Image (cartoon, rainbow, N blue to C red):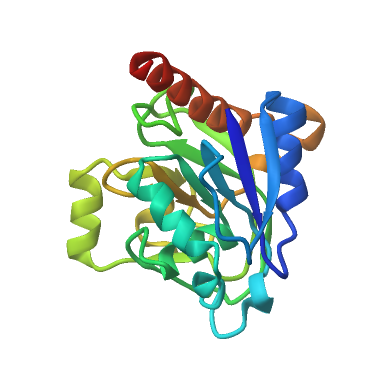
Amino acid sequence: MKFAVLVFPGSNCDLDMYHAIKDELGEEVEYVWHDDSDLSQFDGILIPGGFSYGDYLRGGSIARFSNIMNSIYEANKQGKPILGVCNGFQILLEAGLLPGAMQRNERLKFICRHVDLVVEHNDSMFTNEYDKGEVISVPVAHGEGNYYCDEATYEKLLENNQIAFRYKENINGSRHQIAGITNERGNVLGMMPHPERAVDTLLGSADGLKLFKSIVKSWREAHVVSS
């Protein structure tokens, strides 16, 4: 499986994402600059955290207009797995690929520490290596990670099983402690915690590695079926 790690001006988690895929997972991966326009050669798209374009206006609001976004829309149409972490989640929200919006943390302070997440379900391409209800330790590093959606959207998220992860404790004010959601089709995941920073016990946790293993497992199963 071949992954693309997108790089925007201000990205700072692209190296972590690259390391997780190449060194820990053993899969192919390449950096792709935000001004490029072709992602057709890649099987999975990874949008890392950081501060794209300095987070001017809002996190992800300028990156949403980058040239590469047209290829991301096309990858979504094709059902390719797309993962946006932290600022990548913000970009997916701004681009309309996921519902809801991101606000400043409830206490208006930057949060940087390991937190416990609850895996809401394990029947998606991002969670199939976990157990339903499993509690995992993954670091967060954000100041604008307070997820918001209206009640109708929340009910739809529940109905379609789109909530992938919740915070065990509400660290930032996110509605119903939501830490990560998918689109209705299930091929796009946005999450504020950083699984790429939890792929080795030397980093404090290896719980994030299962997320990337889940993507590869789903892709290989689909590839075998289609071939």
Quick check: can you spot residue 199? Answer: no
Quick check: 7 above or below 46? below
Q: Residue at x 45, y 62 (%)?
A: 70
Q: Residue at x 47, y 46 (%)?
A: 82
Residue 102: where, in percent of width, then height? 45, 69
Which residue is painted at 35% across and 56% down in the image? 176
Seen in the picture, residue 26 relative to 4 is either above or below; the reply is above
Q: Residue furthest bottom?
A: 57
Question: In the picture, residue 227 is in which quadrant?
Answer: top left
Q: Is residue 152 left or right of residue 54?
A: left
Picture quarter containing residue 33? bottom right
Compared across the picture, whether 213 is left or right of 101 comes to right
Q: Is residue 32 visible?
A: yes
Q: Is residue 72 above or below residue 22?
A: below
Closer to the camera in the image, 167 or 191: 191
Front-lying residue, 113 or 129: 129
The mark total stands at 0
Quarter of the picture holding the N terminus:
top right
Query: Relative to 81, is 88 above or below?
Result: below
- Where is residue 182 drawn, in percent x and y? 37, 47
Q: Is residue 210 left or right of residue 92?
A: right
Where is residue 93? Give x, y as percent: 42, 65
Which residue is painted at 37% across and 36% down in the image? 120
The answer to which quarter of the image holds residue 222 is top left
Q: Position of residue 90 (x, y in %)?
A: 50, 65
Left or right: 159 in relation to 169: left
Residue that protrudes farthest toward the right in the picture = 202
